[in-house]
């Protein structure tokens, strides 16, 4: 009886933890590695276990670093069930198909080069047909309702407050001999009191804990009033006669921005802008958000009940754009407007067209809403580079650049500690494994845990194990 850590081990992405229990194999998450191209390419292709030998998979949430390599499992012979919360399953439908499309087009690009060099073409990591087969294997589960993924193990999902459908995974083991025990996998933990989503829940009587520590060494700055800042950006851009361009992740951050704009609109503070959400994935994900009231917080529901159209993710001047030709139309749209588009770090997708067409115009405002990784176009613009390359062409940055100190999807060091202390209260906690983080923040957080009286903390490297029972 043990857990083997194969992904998100001393790194953030690629979440993959394998439980071995009385001859059965249960996988927690099967995420994709992101980062340097070559390394990610290799790591995502080499599964560290036989896909066909797994009995079941339990998914914590639909983010690609947790779900994105499920289609590889299926492509390599996995035939068991993939359990997910209903909302995660419904989001995964769109996210896995989107991811498959990206895999196919990435490899096409690489293969063009390889062909020129006389090299053999690569296969894509997986294709859209694999994503469809994966979705067919998914089993929707309700929050708070136990189910049995393998004999002797009962699983219950709790709210993680991180993204729509995101769950804390609680596993109750009853071995044939020996004492029953409880293992909790935090998945990605969110924060209390963020817009839209319900707060993370506490679990009690925990013996073993696998916990994320992404921001284990950081305390989030208070975001200030995001709504006030958004209002100011909108009013100033409107007065200048320009476009307000908001790069945002399609799932989560986009809906948060729409919700805030909706509230500003309801309060009568939004200039008579047209607002365009230009990302097919964002459009699909927004539909899923509307369907899952069980995941939404009271403030959002109150807003829903108050509004005539019963839709806090829609208002009169808001337009969702799916088709490429409608997106291209925006290039010729001359009036002031707001465009929300992906990718959030400006690494690809339709946002690049909008930046290309508007970045040299001083009446444009670019408003960043999330973390910008080093070396991305988003980071370069945010750092104040005067010239950036878009589609290989140099462009002068004349637009005004702003950053919304919006809420992060992850709890900070204080939030993580508080949550862990809640779990440890029963005094049963035997071992803690910190995952989903770089070594440095993990070590600092391990130190904080020890100071608070939580001992036996490990930071597993890939292939390390934690004994159970
Ligand atoms: Zn996540
Ligand atoms: Zn994650």
Image (cartoon, rainbow, N blue to C red):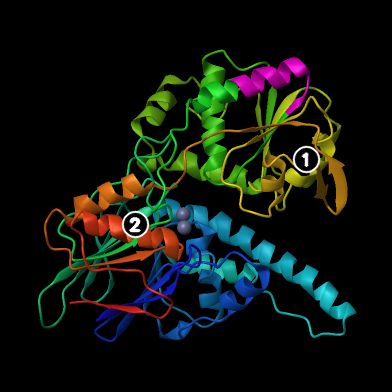
- Which residue is situated farthest in the top direction here? 268
Q: Earlier in the sequence, mark 2 or mark 1?
A: 1
Note whether residue 140 is visible.
no
- In the displayed structure, 350 sits above or below 19; it is above
Point out residue 278 in the picture as x, y percentages from the top left corner.
69, 40
Give the side of residue 412 with respect to residue 397, left or right: left
Q: CA distance from mark 2 to mark 1?
A: 39 Å
Mark 2 touching mark 1, by CB under 8 A? Answer: no
Taking depth in this image into account, of 337 and 24 the one nearest to the observer is: 337
- In the displayed structure, 386 sits above or below 426; it is above
The secondary element bearing badge 2 is classed as helix
Point out residue 443 in the picture as x, y percentages from the top left corner.
37, 62
Q: Could you tell me which residue is drawn at 50 percent across and 45 percent down?
A: 288
Point out residue 336 in the picture as x, y percentages from the top left corner.
76, 22
**Label 2 crowd bin: few (<14), some (14–19), many (20+), radius 10 Å:** many
Taking depth in this image into account, of 381 and 165 the one nearest to the observer is: 381
Point out residue 225 in the picture as x, y percentages from the top left corner.
48, 25
Give the prevailing secondary structure in the magenta stretch: helix
Residue at mark 2: C-beta within 8 A of ligand 2: no
Taking depth in this image into account, of 384 and 80 the one nearest to the observer is: 384
Give the side of residue 402 with respect to residue 411, left or right: right
**Label 1 crowd bin: few (<14), some (14–19), many (20+), radius 10 Å:** many
- In the displayed structure, 251 sits above or below 314; it is below
- In the displayed structure, 81 sits above or below 306; it is below
Please state the extent of the stretch shown in magenta in the rendering.
Answer: 232-243
Say whether residue 366 is magenta. Answer: no
Give the side of residue 179 with respect to residue 113, left or right: left
Q: Which residue is mark 1?
A: 355
Residue 445: give its label. 2
The secondary element bearing badge 1 is classed as helix
Note whether residue 44 is visible.
yes
Taking depth in this image into account, of 156 and 311 the one nearest to the observer is: 156
């Amino acid at each position: 009886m043990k857990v083997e850590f194969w992904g998100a081990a001393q790194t953030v992405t690629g979440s993959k933890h394998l439980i071995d229990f009385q001859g059965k194999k249960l996988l927690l998450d099967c995420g994709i590695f992101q980062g340097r191209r070559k390394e990610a390419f290799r790591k995502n292709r080499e599964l560290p276990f036989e896909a066909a030998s797994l009995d079941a998979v339990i998914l914590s949430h639909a983010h690609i670093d947790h779900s994105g390599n499920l289609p590889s499992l299926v492509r390599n012979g996995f035939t068991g069930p993939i359990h997910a919360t209903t909302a995660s399953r419904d989001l995964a439908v769109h996210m896995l198909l989107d991811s498959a499309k990206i895999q196919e087009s990435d490899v096409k690009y690489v293969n063009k080069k390889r062909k020129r060099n006389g090299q053999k073409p690569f296969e894509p990591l997986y294709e859209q047909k694999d994503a469809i087969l994966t979705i067919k294997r998914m089993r929707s589960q309700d929050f708070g309702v136990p189910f049995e993924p393998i004999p002797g193990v009962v699983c219950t999902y709790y709210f993680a407050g991180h993204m729509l459908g995101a769950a804390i995974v609680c596993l109750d083991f009853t071995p044939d001999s020996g004492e029953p025990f409880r293992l909790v996998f935090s998945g990605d933990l969110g924060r209390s009191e963020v817009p839209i989503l319900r707060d993370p829940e506490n679990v009690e009587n925990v013996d073993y804990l696998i916990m994320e520590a992404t921001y284990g060494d950081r305390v989030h700055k208070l975001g200030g009033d995001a709504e006030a800042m958004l209002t100011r950006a909108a009013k100033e851009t409107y007065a200048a006669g320009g476009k307000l361009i908001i790069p945002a992740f399609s799932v989560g951050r986009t809906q948060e921005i729409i919700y805030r704009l909706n509230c500003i609109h309801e309060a009568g503070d939004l200039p008579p802008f047209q607002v365009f959400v230009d990302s097919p994935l964002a459009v699909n994900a927004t539909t899923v958000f509307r369907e899952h009231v069980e995941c939404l917080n009271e403030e959002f529901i109150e807003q829903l009940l108050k509004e005539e159209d019963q839709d806090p993710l829609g208002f009169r001047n808001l337009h969702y754009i799916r088709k490429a030709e409608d997106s291209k139309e925006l290039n010729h749209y001359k009036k002031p407007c707001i465009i929300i588009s992906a990718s959030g770090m400006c690494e690809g997708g339709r946002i690049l067209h909008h930046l290309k067409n508007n970045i040299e115009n001083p009446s444009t405002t670019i408003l960043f809403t999330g973390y910008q990784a080093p070396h991305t176009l988003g980071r370069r613009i945010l750092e104040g580079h005067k010239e950036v390359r878009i589609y290989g062409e140099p462009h002068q940055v004349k637009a005004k650049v702003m950053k919304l100190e919006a809420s992060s999807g992850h709890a900070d060091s204080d939030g993580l500690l508080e949550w862990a202390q809640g779990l440890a209260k029963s005094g049963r906690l035997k071992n803690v494994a910190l995952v989903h983080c770089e070594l440095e923040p993990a070590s600092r957080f391990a130190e904080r845990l020890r100071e608070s009286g939580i001992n036996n903390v490990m930071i597993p490297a890939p292939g390390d194990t934690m004994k159970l029972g």
